Each structure stands twice: as structure tokens, then as C-alpha cells.
Amino acid sequence: MKRVLPFLLLALAIMLACGKSIDKLSADSETFRLATTLAEKIPMLNPEKNATLVKAKSFSLSAGSLFKELETNMGKNISQLTDADTTELSSFLHRVLNSMVESRVLLNAAQTEGVAVDSTQVDSVVQTFFRNNGGEERFMQILEANGLTLDILKEDITENLIKENFLNDNVFANMQITPDDLQNAYNEDKTTTVRHILLMTQGKSPEEKETIHSQMENLLAQAKAGENFSDLAKKYTEDPGSKENGGLYEDIQRGQMVKEFEDAAFSVPIGQISDIIETSYGYHILKIEGRKKESRPFDEVKAALERQLQNRMRQSLYTQTIDSLKAAEKVEILFN
């Protein structure tokens, strides 16, 4: 699944993660006090200890790095993190750390290749921000209201353009969609409807994950023995987006869910229950309720299919590149 805390969407949409390594937080700062409060839920966030949350061959990310990143990207909205419960907070911070790691390894690779951008490219992006947000004055008000600055925005735009240019020139340049690819995509199931049960594992220790897996094995046995899947989902799932609907997600299109979830949702036979599937969120079991194929003529949807295939291929190539770069850096996430 792809989920972000709703109250953080606006702040995160304004800025792009840059993943810089930052020193410890100043003890007299609001962010230090916020980190101290959140450490009551997740002790590794304690700003006094400034624990290492990610280590790699050429960089590391500390608790201070994480909070400086949050401060830069969220501005005043960072205080809203106190509203999240422990599971929700841990899940969100894992996503932020993963984003920081991806950004760092990509930027390192781009700089190794000598990729650079000039100020005119950056200014062009800034002008786009202005146009899409009611003009320069209005956009500057938005930045100020969130405790952000134009200089910070330009710095992040520069780094993201460097990464984008690297990907376009070194990863996406040779993508090709053939006529057979288009026809095969047209013949595929277009959507799938599933019910699922999720037990979260983000931020859990290996021992806790083992216990959670055993709990999911028990739920899977109950479901395969004929117990009502919807009732089991309402009682046990930890996915707030589908809990009240008995774990139901209707008419899921390809690319909407994380890969492991999607693969099962489109491959398990209709009416059957999947084995336990692990994603970045936790352990899932799915029951496939039904699927639909494209009903419109091929020529009518050909252009849209080509865009979808390009997006899928880009995502696949991006994931492969990130995995390769992380492996070369020996990235280890220590945050739990």
C-alpha cells in the first residue's frame, strides 16, 4: 500500500527530501524539545543521545539528521507529529529515512558522474512553483507560513534536478515499448478487487516480527478454514484505510499499491486466499474478490497504455537502481 499521514501531505508536497547529514540539534531549539517529546514514544529519537539511525560506507544519518530534514521539509507543521500514535509515527519516519537514503545514494552517484545543473534550470522550476500556487507573492506567503525559505527550496530543487538528470541520462535513456508490450498490456486484467488483512511490522524488532508472523499464520489458517474474511479483517487488520470495510479495496489499478501487494492482487486466482506477503508496511494476506479487463477498443486506449507502461518501466528501473546503489553502499537501517 502507499499511505502517508494525511495531515502531512501539504507540507511534504511543497519540499523534496535532500538527505543531508546534519549535526546534533541545538539544545535550546523547538525541534530539540519536539524530539524529546517524541522520544517518549520512540526512545531512539532522543536528541541528547543522537543515535545513528542509518549507516552506510560513505555516510550516516543520525536522529539529528532526521529531525533537521523534517524541520526543513515541514516547517511549522513538524509539531503535528505529536498527534501521531507510536505505530503511525514509526511508519512515517521509516518512509522519511528511506527517502533520505534514496536521495543520498542517488546524489552521490550523480556527482560521481559529474552531473550538474545551472541556475536558469533552477529558476525555471521556481517560476513553475509560482504559477501553480497563485503567483510569487502567494507562494512566498505559503513558504513563510510553513517556516520555509526560497533559498532552501532552491537548494533542494538543485539537488533534485541533478538526480533527475542522472536518472534520465543513465537509467531511463534506453527504455523501449514495443507493439507486443502494448498488446499484452491491453490483454491483462485492468483492475482487481481484494480484501486484505495487515499486521504492521514497521519499527519492530526481529523478535517482535517473528511473533507478528505467527499471529498472521494463525489468521491465515482461520481464513483458509472458511471463517468469514471480512469479519476477520474488521477485527484484526491494522490498516485504517480499509478496516471498517472488512479490508476491502475495490478496482485497484496497476501501480497503485506497493509491488509485493500488487503482484499478489493480480496473480492469486479469483476467490482464493494468498499466502503471507511481506511489504514495507508489514505482513498481509489477501482474498481476491474479482478482476476486470479493459472494455474499450485497443486504439482508444493505446496512448494511455503506452504512458502506463513507461511509468511502470521507469518505476522498475528506478527501484533496481536504488537497490543496486544501496547494496554498493552497504546501507543498514538501524531505526526501530
Image: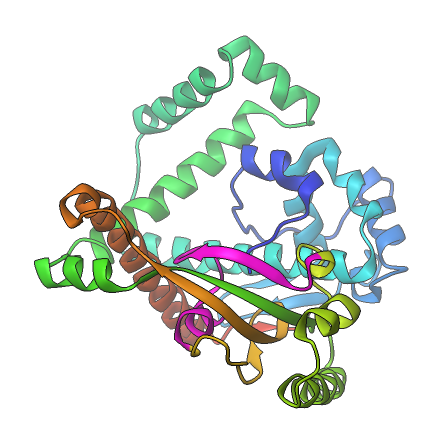
Q: In the rendered view, would you say 229 is above or below 64?
A: below
Left or right for 301, reference 32 = left
Residue 72 appears in the figure = no
The residue stretch that appears in magenta: 245-267
Q: In the rendered view, would you say 48 is above or below 301?
A: below
Q: Nearer the viewer, residue 295 or 335?
A: 295
Left or right for 301, reference 312 = left
Tell me residue 275's x, y (percent): 54, 85
Quarter of the rendering occupied by the N terminus: bottom right
Tell me residue 16's x, y (percent): 51, 41
Quarter of the rendering occupied by the C terminus: bottom right
> Does the magenta-highlighted stretch encompass residue 259?
yes
Residue 314 appears in the figure = yes
Q: In the rendered view, would you say 52 is above or below 252?
A: below
> Does the magenta-highlighted stretch encompass residue 302?
no
Q: Nearer the viewer, residue 262 or 290?
A: 290
Q: In the rendered view, would you say 275 is above or below 111?
A: below
Tell me residue 314's x, y (percent): 30, 56
Tell me residue 299's x, y (percent): 13, 45
Point 63% across, 15% down: residue: 141
